[in-house]
Image (tube, rainbow, N blue to C red):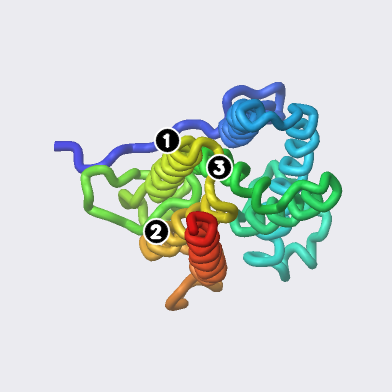
Amino acid sequence: MLQFITWDPSPEIFRIGSIAAVRWYGLLFAISFFFGYLILQKIFKKEGVPIKLLDELTTYMILGTILGARLGHVFFYEPAWYIAHPIKILEIWEGGLASHGAAIGIICSLLIFSYVRKKPFLWVIDRIVIVVALSGFLIRMGNLMNSEIYGLPTSLPWGFLFVRSTTPEDGLLPRHPTQIYEGLSYLATFFLLWWYYYKKNGKPASGMLFGVFLVMIFGIRIIIEFIKEPQVGFERGLTLNMGQMLSIPFVIAGCIFIFLAMRRSRSAAL
């Protein structure tokens, strides 16, 4: 009886000569922006907001996501190596994007957008997090296609044997497909936020969606990290790894936003 799943897909869709022209990760990353745009377009139309504003917001989002994710990896995980090899910071195609950095980059870009366009920050980010949760799912599927960010060895029947990435030093053993665990949790978060937005007829309490997003995404991340293989060497032996330590402030912030949103709702009902 099969006790594990052998996972050995190529991360490349096709090549042109010696260059990997299209990779699954890049395609899924691009698809996340495409579907995110369609969903936000529907939200903007529902609320009577000009679509022109969405086009500008998309530009801010793309820049904030890519710059934040890359710089997050550089400074959170391998600062010494990148300081010694600064040109490598630009070589994003070689991998190295951090979700916590992306979160910070998105927040910063939306703060700038809100200031420039005089739109309330909480209004903007409450709607953005709906599509960010969906993007998180697609990006984790990209990690799966890259055979990266996998979990610790497991004897469970759905363990994945990551043929391309598991080194002899680690042991060629079935491992937790933590990319799928995280991806499905992000997808569930997307459906919850989308449902709640429509349940409130497009008028959720300011900060509520943002707060729920932070608690769910980063709370789940803390739990899954316990069964995830360390991404960099210095994490080995730590009680909490870098991903968990970076997630804690986001969860606390989410709880605060939820509390304040509930208080605003009670005040408005009086």
> What secondary structure is found at the residue carrying circle 1?
loop
N-terminal label among 1 and 2: 1
Q: x and y percent of residue 217 in the render? A: 48, 54
Identify the disc placed on residue 88.
none
Q: Which residue is mark 3?
A: 203
Few, some or many C-alpha atoms within 10 Å of disc 1 (few <14, some 14-19, many ≥20)? some
Front residue of 113/174: it is 113
Q: Which residue is mark 2?
A: 224
Label 3 sits on what residue type? Lys
Q: x and y percent of residue 19 in the render? A: 71, 29
Alpha-carbon span between mark 1 and mark 2: 23 Å
At 72% across and 70% down in the image, what residue appears? 80
N-terminal label among 3 and 1: 1
> What secondary structure is found at the residue carrying circle 2?
helix
Q: x and y percent of residue 141 in the render? A: 48, 38
Label 1 sits on what residue type? Asp
Q: Is residue 52 left or right of residue 37?
A: right
Q: Is residue 221 visible?
A: yes
Front residue of 172/94: it is 94
The quarter of the picture where residue 3 lies is top left
Vertical relation: 59 (above or below) 237? above
Vertical relation: 1 (above or below) 35? below
Farthest-out residue, right: 116
At 72% across and 32% down in the image, what residue appears? 49
Q: Which residue is mark 1?
A: 8
Front residue of 89/72: it is 72
> What secondary structure is found at the residue carrying circle 3?
loop
